[in-house]
Amino acid sequence: ARPGRAEEASAELTDYLAAQKKVFTSVRRAGGGEFFEREGLLFLSKPAVEQVTGKIIAAQPLLGTLAADPSLRGVFDALDLAAQGVLHGDTTAHTLDTTFNAVADGAEAALYDRYAPLSWQHLFSGREPQATELRRFVLTKPVVNYARLEPGKAATQAIYDSAKQLGLTADRGVRVRVTGPVALSDAEFSTLTKGARLSGGLSVALLLLWLMLGLRSLRIVGAIVITLVVGLVACADFAVIAVGALNPISIAFAVLFIGIAVDFGIQFSLRYRDERFRFDDFTIALRRTGRGIGRALTIAAAAAAVGFLSFVPTDYTGVSDLGLIAGFGMVVALILNLTLLPALLTLLRPRGEARPVGFAWAVPVERFLIRRRFVVLGIAALAGLGGIALLPGLTFDFNPLHLQNPKDEAVATLNDLMSDPNATPYTIDVLAPSSEAADGLARKLDTLPEVARTLTATSFVPSDQTEKLAVLADARQLLGPTLSPATLKPSPSPDDTIKAITRAQADIAAVGAQGSMAAERLAADLVIALARGGDALPPLEANLSAGIPQRLKELRLALSAQPVDLAGLPDDLKRDWVTPDGRARIEVYPEGNPGNNDVLRVFAAAVRGVAPSATGTPISIQESARTVMNAFTAAAIIALTVIALLLALVLRRIGDMALVLAPLLLAGLFTLATCVLFGVPLNFANIIALPLLLGVGVAFDIYFVVRWRDGQSDLLASSTARAILFSALTTGTAFGSLALSTYPGTSEMGRLLTLALFYTLLCTFTVLPALLGPVKSGAKASGKN
């Protein structure tokens, strides 16, 4: 890679993109241009400037030859001149080893038709290029189309297409990469869609399988699926009207609706099968089903809706939108399962039932749980206390970048930038009333151990300019005639170039005979090149002489540096640092790895301790995390309070209300404790498992409590238990499809949802029967199953 090539490529790409007005509203280069080419050496230390100019002066014979003949012929004439210097005893072969090896690298690549241009800038200066010299930034403001899933895709594609058309490709020594808010957002939605067809198809197939195993009737399954589809369409229409654009959080409404709405359908249908077994008359069974399950479904739907709607007043837009859509979905699911589903069953007329619906094998299990209820409850209580003890170890990952696929180009590029302390985008900005105030505040910030460095407009005014300019003036006076010859040689013919290579090869071989391995290597490469004749010249020119005029121009410009002051900075540079009314920006860089949350946390806290009004990504993402946590805390309090009041109003017993909520709270504790034990932090995506736990868990518990109050014994053997189990399997399948997503945020959401569902089912089937105990005498009997 050549530093000069990065500058050339960024200039070419900037001009090309700027002409595409329909795709970009603004295109400009950052940290490039004539100012940095001319004044760049002034930003080095004085010893470094002296070292660089010394290397350039030492290369004066080489520079003189190239300046008079900036062609492949001139390159080999210069190399021949250097070799003759060794043969005449004017210098030693060792001093030319670096040059000969560098030219040999380029020549060998050319022999294999590989593009590997020689860095003449490195040879002239003797200085290894820094990472910042090999990278240039082009800042674009794209025209985004929000009607598309990836609004900035056209702009991103235009960049890649433009780079290809300009020849800015890896095989030509240039790699163009795209990142930024628009590209990251597009990558997020692109990842969401990848594999969605496969995971979605697998999810649907498994869902149908569970429905068939649980209901054992194709007609009933068909009725549930139709009801589900109608409800999903209604929710999608409502989402478009009420919310508009969806995001990676709110788009999960579909999974939530399917997960809970299918539960309502399974509960209704299995209750119907139960009644049909006991009363072999369709009309009587359907009527008894409506009367028997209607209240429980209504309470479950109301509680789930309240759980979701509690997020609407919060400041977390994604979850607020999701809460609104999912809350509406619960109402839709209830209405459809009490109206459309019975109507479809009436049309389809499923066959009668030949055997009981529940799990006969579960009778001894439940009786054991009731007989040993205090042991079961004691174990549950101890486990709950252990979960409470672990809660302080729960962490929240506030970095949204961790939710995206690190293999996506935009994400990988941003991660690479963050690994460079001088290029990380995770910086903090502070606005000061003036440049003088900015410099003073920057000095205070520089004293903080959490701060690596600060930049202000004054940072672009080099220090010790008088001494450095004097060094450059001496070099310019000495090299001026060399770099700007009065006449240039005419362009060579292929024969002229081959003759120059032949002369150089002979003298370089003679140097090699004196023991220089670098000269011997280069001479051998040139023998092969000469054997190929004119066919070898184009790749040799591409690798050895292309760009020499530009490099010489840059060298002349670098030696002509002028004094720099704040007022003399380029306008486009000043606009980035000083506002028209005189306020000045300070850019603060973190010490340590900015991809580490702890580093960002202490960095932001330290900077805000000195400059409370500071802003930037490290601060905004933490403020977002605080907003999310506050939103979930407020929503949890609202939801639990309203659900408790709703249950107390409907069930009219505080004890029954506690019976519904206790297993749910225990399942939540177990879920969070598992996260702590396995080092799984909560984040912007998987935290959604908590409201879903509320919706599903309340429904499961209500079904059991209502039947228990109605005098139903052997709950685990009933149709309700079968419905809850297969509802959990179908819901878990929907969540499992999320866990298979290639988008880490969605995948983590799916895993935590599945974990929460597992603990909800566990507590419902073990802890709840022990809490309920035996059916109370005098309770209204509802039949055997």
Image (cartoon, helix red, strand yellow):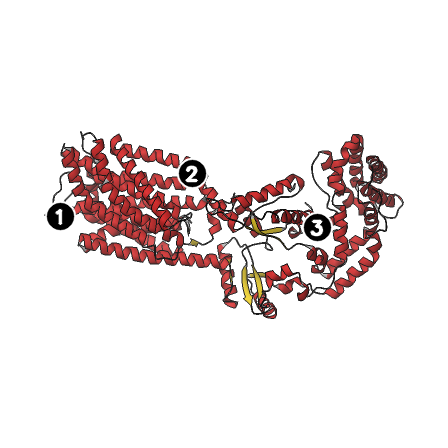
Report the label total.
3
User: From the viewer's perspective, is the residue at label 1 or at label 2 nearer?
Assistant: 2
**Precedes in sequence: disc 3 or disc 2:** 3
**Precedes in sequence: disc 1 or disc 2:** 2
Q: Residue furthest right?
A: 88
Q: Point out residue 191 in the picture as x, y percentages from the top left corner.
A: 47, 42
In the depicted view, which residue is nearer to us: 67 or 527? 67
- 3 and 2 marks in contact (CB < 8 Å): no
Of the 4 image quadrants, the one containing the C terminus is: top left
Number of other residues with Cα within 10 Å of mark 3, as a class: few under 14, some 14 to 19, many 20 or more: few
Q: Point out residue 427 in the picture as x, y percentages from the top left corner.
A: 55, 58
Mark 3 and mark 2: span between their CA atoms?
A: 47 Å
Q: Residue furthest left?
A: 778
- The residue tagged 3 is 128
Mark 1 and mark 2: span between their CA atoms?
A: 50 Å
Mark 1 and mark 3: span between their CA atoms?
A: 86 Å
**SS for dot 2:** helix
Q: Is residue 61 above or below residue 114?
A: below
In the depicted view, which residue is nearer to us: 688 or 546? 546
| In the image: residue 181, left or right of residue 660 | right
In the depicted view, which residue is nearer to us: 327 or 404? 327
- The residue tagged 1 is 776
- The residue tagged 2 is 196
| In the image: residue 604, left or right of residue 774 | right
Q: Is residue 443 above or below residue 400?
A: below
**Amino acid residing under circle 3:** Glu
**Amino acid residing under circle 1:** Lys
User: From the viewer's perspective, is the residue at label 3 or at label 2 nearer?
Assistant: 2
